[in-house]
C-alpha cells in the first residue's frame, strides 16, 4: 500500500464523515452540502477502486494484446454515473429547500408533531412496568 492509497483512503473517509455529520444537521443547506460531500466521497472511492492507471482500453486488434496493461473502464463509467445521479439529487434537494424557504422563511427542519406524539407514547410504554396487565394487577407488578 503506497502513501497515495493511504492519503486517498483518509480523504474518502473524511468526506464521508463530514457528509454524514452535515446530513444530521437541521439546516436544509447543510443537508444539501452533506449530500454533495457524500457524492464526492463515493466518486473518489469508485475511482480509487479502479486500480492503478493504465493504457486506454482501446486495442489495436492485434493478437498479441497484453490485457493487464489496460485500465478498467467500469469504475470510470460508474463514477460518471454517480456524478450524474449526485447532480440530479442535488438539484432536486436545492429545489425542495428553496420551496421550503419560500413557504416558511427559514431553512430549519421543523419537528414533526406526529413523530413527537409517537415518541411520547413509546416512552410511556417503556415507563409502564406491565402494560399488558389490567390496571388492578399493575400495582402488584411494579
Image (cartoon, rainbow, N blue to C red):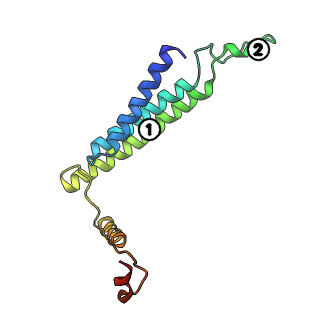
> Is 28 on the left-hand or right-hand side of 68?
left
Q: Is 94 located above or below residue 3 in the figure? A: below
Q: Which residue is mark 1?
A: 86
Q: How many marks?
A: 2
Rate crowding at label 1 as few (under 14), some (14 to 19) or many (20 or more) other CA atoms within 10 Å: many
Rate crowding at label 2 as few (under 14), some (14 to 19) or many (20 or more) other CA atoms within 10 Å: few
Q: Secondary structure at mark 1?
A: helix
Of label 2 and label 1, which has the lower sequence position? Answer: 2
Q: Secondary structure at mark 2?
A: loop
Question: Residue 49's quadrant in the figure?
Answer: top right
Question: Residue 114's quadrant in the figure?
Answer: bottom left
Q: Which residue, as the protein is rendered here, is positioned at the far bottom?
A: 136
Q: Which residue is mark 2?
A: 61
Q: Which residue, as the protein is rendered here, is positioned at the far right?
A: 63
Frontmost of labels 2 and 1 is 1
Q: Is 129 located above or below residue 74 in the figure? A: below
Q: Quadrant of the N terminus?
A: top right
For residue 60, the mark is none
> Is 57 on the left-hand or right-hand side of 89?
right
Q: Position of residue 88 (x, y in %)?
A: 43, 41
Q: Position of residue 67 (x, y in %)?
A: 72, 16
Task: Give the residue at x 29% y 48%.
Answer: 97
Q: Position of residue 12 (x, y in %)?
A: 44, 28
Task: Give the residue at x 44% y 19%.
Answer: 7
Q: How far, Cα to Cα, is label 2 from label 1?
A: 37 Å
Q: Position of residue 116 (x, y in %)?
A: 29, 65
Task: Give the residue at x 53% y 24%.
Answer: 48
Task: Give the residue at x 58% y 28%.
Answer: 75
> Is 90 on the left-hand or right-hand side of 63?
left
Residue 32 visible? The answer is no
Q: Is 116 located above or below residue 23 in the figure? A: below
Q: Quadrant of the C terminus?
A: bottom left
Amino acid at each position: 500500500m503506497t502513501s497515495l492509497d493511504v492519503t486517498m483512503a483518509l480523504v474518502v473517509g473524511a468526506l464521508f464523515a463530514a457528509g454524514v455529520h452535515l446530513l444530521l444537521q437541521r439546516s436544509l443547506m447543510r443537508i444539501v452540502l452533506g449530500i454533495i460531500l457524500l457524492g464526492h466521497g463515493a466518486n473518489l472511492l469508485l475511482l480509487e477502486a479502479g486500480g492503478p492507471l493504465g493504457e486506454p482500453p482501446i486495442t489495436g486488434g492485434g493478437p498479441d494484446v497484453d490485457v493487464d496493461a489496460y485500465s478498467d473502464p467500469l469504475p470510470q463509467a460508474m463514477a460518471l454515473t454517480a456524478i450524474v445521479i449526485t447532480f440530479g439529487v442535488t438539484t432536486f434537494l436545492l429545489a425542495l429547500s428553496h420551496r421550503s424557504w419560500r413557504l416558511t422563511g427559514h431553512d430549519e427542519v421543523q419537528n414533526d408533531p406526529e413523530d413527537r406524539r409517537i415518541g411520547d407514547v413509546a416512552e410511556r410504554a417503556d415507563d409502564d412496568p406491565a402494560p399488558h396487565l389490567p390496571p388492578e394487577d399493575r400495582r402488584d407488578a411494579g
